[in-house]
């Protein structure tokens, strides 16, 4: 027994001595040369720091991109568990400048039902018909105001794409393919918006040039309802991208139309157009050839582009059917820190500037506005609708719903939950069928919450929430109305009168859910004498 212990101690001592010698001889880390062996403690703590902070140290509202409260709300909603919070808010609303306050109405046209489950299965379609204003052959009313934002197969695993696609089918919403082409994982019943990025993945020829015939074949063979031209994305605007050779599997190569096992580069600019004039020509060509509504996705930086675009739309009659604005706070699989942190405006500021340009030229009612950038949280989404969004797209919140734990390792191919990796072992842990239900539950819950807030504000649909229903706190003693904050004129942020009437009629057509008991006889008598 004693001899065994001595042998173990000697082995341990030798191992420590070997580490100490290696530390003293290496030159890469000054810390280890100066503090052999114990210096490793610092690296160990650095490695587990994020997990320590996430689970032990950080408060409920401290972490970013998503706080623990926000993640808990998404997880509980995705599992259809109790997503209520007890004892009142733990947000510091009295002292947080920029905090949005939604103003309920005491007597409104619409009344929120009182049972928590009410509205869960309610259809909440878009208040505008996509492509109708420009007479596109395949114009349609998107069934859901909440849709799944573009995330390509490549940045996400095949299992994650499949889970989101099946989830989209269950929730009756659209899934945007992202710029990585349309893969077999996108073909599980969910309807699609096909995104055309700078590399024209999925619709390119062998030399990487855009190929209209391939695009037409692609959209004819899949449930594609609209085309989105990606100009930029909030987390890395103005940058292209690179999928490293190790990640370019045979399946990804076939989906994108590239060579397997070779670095896959997305250029930072499109080759098919070079200014707003040629962009609008291209939009019109795509719409005429496919019949589909065509839109653009962009982050917001210099406003010259939007000024020219809206001026040309107003002057020439050519135009985009939808505009997706991505906030600088948006996500990505991988990007340089300076771009994720500082390049392009945050959603509210950027969206309001763009919307104003469309509204000043009277184009706003004929364009569907989509927004992205943490809009999968009800409070952010409500402000987006008040500012004029017709649809919100959700990316990372949908990832959370299918199991992402915000480990923020998406750029390493080592995603522990199988969501953002091409590693077969890791992605096999994600069961697409089970997680599809979670994705659908989350989308339905967000829609229900938006509907409830709309009804609390006295209107039948989130798209009818106006800027007068939101104020932004300036601290403990002051608040500014949303229209003043963003310099909106009366009526801006709402669909046209005809669209408002149509969506109110659609929403009122269903069975009323929950609500009050019938009025007492005395109340009926009083109202009869009034
Ligand atoms: C893993 C990942 C991949 C993405 N890929 C794309 C893409 O291919 N095309 C695109 O336009 N946006 C892409 N995005 C951006 C999202 O579509 C979305 O605009 C952004 O994350 C903001 O939404 P969120 O805050 O709900 O995540 C990606 C985001 C993530 C997290
Ligand atoms: S678990 Fe981590 S690595 Fe995986 S998708 Fe979520 S944030 Fe990215």
Image: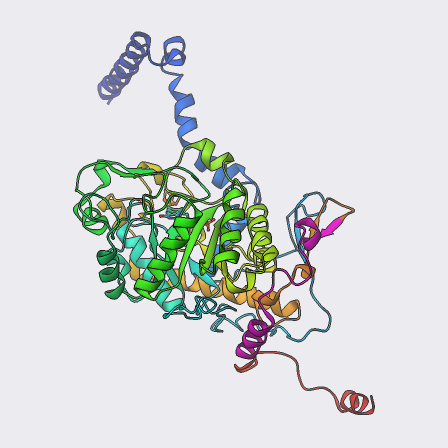
In the picture, measured across the screen, residue 334 lies left or right of residue 358, that is left
Percent x, y of residue 220: 25, 65
Q: Quadrant of the N terminus?
A: top left
Colour scheme of the picture: rainbow
Give the answer, above or below, for where 237 lies relative to 287.
above
Percent x, y of residue 224: 32, 64
Does the segment drawn in magenta span residue 495? Answer: yes
Q: Is residue 122 visible?
A: yes
Does the segment drawn in magenta span residue 122? Answer: no
Q: Quadrant of the C terminus?
A: bottom right
Number of numbered callouts drawn: 0
- Return the residue nearer the eye: 372 or 491: 491
- Return the residue nearer the eye: 94 or 22: 94
Task: State the residue at coordinates (43%, 27%).
Answer: 45
- Return the residue nearer the eye: 125 or 493: 493
Task: State the residue at coordinates (17%, 42%).
Answer: 259
Q: Quadrant of residue 490?
A: bottom right
Give the answer, above or below, for where 447 lies relative to 62.
below
Task: State the residue at coordinates (57%, 81%).
Answer: 512
Percent x, y of residue 456: 65, 68
In the picture, measured across the screen, residue 357 lies left or right of residue 151, that is right
User: Which span is picked out in magenta?
Assistant: 479-507
Give the answer, above or below, for where 168 lies relative to 37.
below
Q: Is residue 403 visible?
A: no
Percent x, y of residue 100: 65, 52
């Amino acid at each position: 027994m004693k001899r065994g212990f001595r042998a173990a101690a000697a082995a341990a001592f030798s191992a420590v001595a070997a580490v100490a010698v290696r530390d003293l001889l290496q030159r890469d880390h000054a810390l280890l040369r100066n503090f052999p062996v114990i210096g490793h403690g610092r690296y160990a703590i650095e490695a587990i720091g994020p997990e320590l902070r996430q689970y032990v140290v950080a408060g409920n509202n401290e972490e970013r991109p998503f706080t623990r409260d926000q993640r808990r709300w998404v997880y509980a909603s995705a599992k259809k568990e109790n997503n209520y919070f007890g004892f009142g808010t733990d947000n510091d609303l009295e002292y947080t400048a920029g905090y949005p306050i939604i103003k309920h109405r005491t007597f409104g046209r619409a009344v929120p039902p009182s049972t928590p489950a009410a509205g869960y299965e309610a259809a909440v379609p878009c208040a505008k018909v996509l492509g109708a204003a420009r007479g596109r052959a395949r114009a349609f009313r998107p069934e859901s105001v909440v849709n799944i934002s573009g995330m390509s197969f490549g940045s996400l695993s095949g299992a994650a794409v499949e889970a989101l696609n099946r989830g989209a089918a269950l929730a009756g919403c659209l899934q945007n393919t992202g710029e990585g082409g349309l893969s077999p994982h996108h073909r599980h019943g969910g309807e699609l918006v096909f995104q055309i990025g700078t590399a024209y993945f999925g619709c390119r020829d062998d030399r990487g040039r855009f190929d209209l015939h391939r695009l037409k074949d692609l959209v004819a063979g899949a449930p594609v309802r609209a085309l989105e031209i990606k100009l930029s994305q909030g987390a890395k605007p103005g940058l292209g991208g690179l999928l490293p050779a190790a990640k370019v599997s045979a399946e990804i190569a076939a989906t994108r139309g590239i060579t397997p096992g070779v670095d896959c580069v997305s250029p930072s600019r499109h080759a098919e157009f070079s200014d707003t004039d040629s962009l609008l020509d291209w939009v019109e060509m795509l719409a005429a050839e496919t019949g589909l509504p065509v839109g653009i996705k962009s982050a917001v930086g210099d406003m010259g582009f939007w000024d020219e675009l809206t001026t040309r739309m107003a002057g020439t009659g050519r135009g985009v059917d939808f505009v997706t604005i991505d906030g600088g706070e948006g996500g990505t699989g991988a990007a340089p820190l300076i771009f994720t942190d500082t390049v392009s405006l945050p959603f509210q500021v950027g969206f309001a500037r763009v919307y104003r340009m469309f509204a000043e030229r009277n184009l706003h009612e004929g364009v569907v506005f989509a927004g992205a950038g943490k809009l999968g949280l009800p409070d952010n989404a409500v402000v987006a609708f008040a500012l004029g969004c017709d649809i919100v797209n959700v990316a990372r919140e949908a990832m959370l719903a299918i199991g992402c734990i915000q480990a923020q390792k998406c750029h390493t191919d080592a995603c522990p939950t199988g969501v953002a990796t091409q590693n077969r072992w890791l992605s096999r842990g994600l069961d697409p069928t089970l997680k599809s239900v979670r994705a659908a539950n989350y989308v339905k819950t967000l829609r229900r919450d938006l509907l409830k807030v709309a009804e609390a504000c006295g209107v039948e649909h989130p798209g009818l929430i106006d800027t007068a229903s939101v104020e932004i706190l300036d601290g403990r003693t002051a608040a500014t109305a949303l229209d003043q904050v963003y310099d909106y004129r009366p009526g801006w942020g709402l669909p046209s009168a005809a669209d408002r009437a149509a969506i109110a009629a659609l929403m009122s057509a269903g069975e009323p859910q929950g609500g009050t008991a019938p009025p007492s006889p005395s109340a009926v008598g009083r109202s009869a004498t009034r």
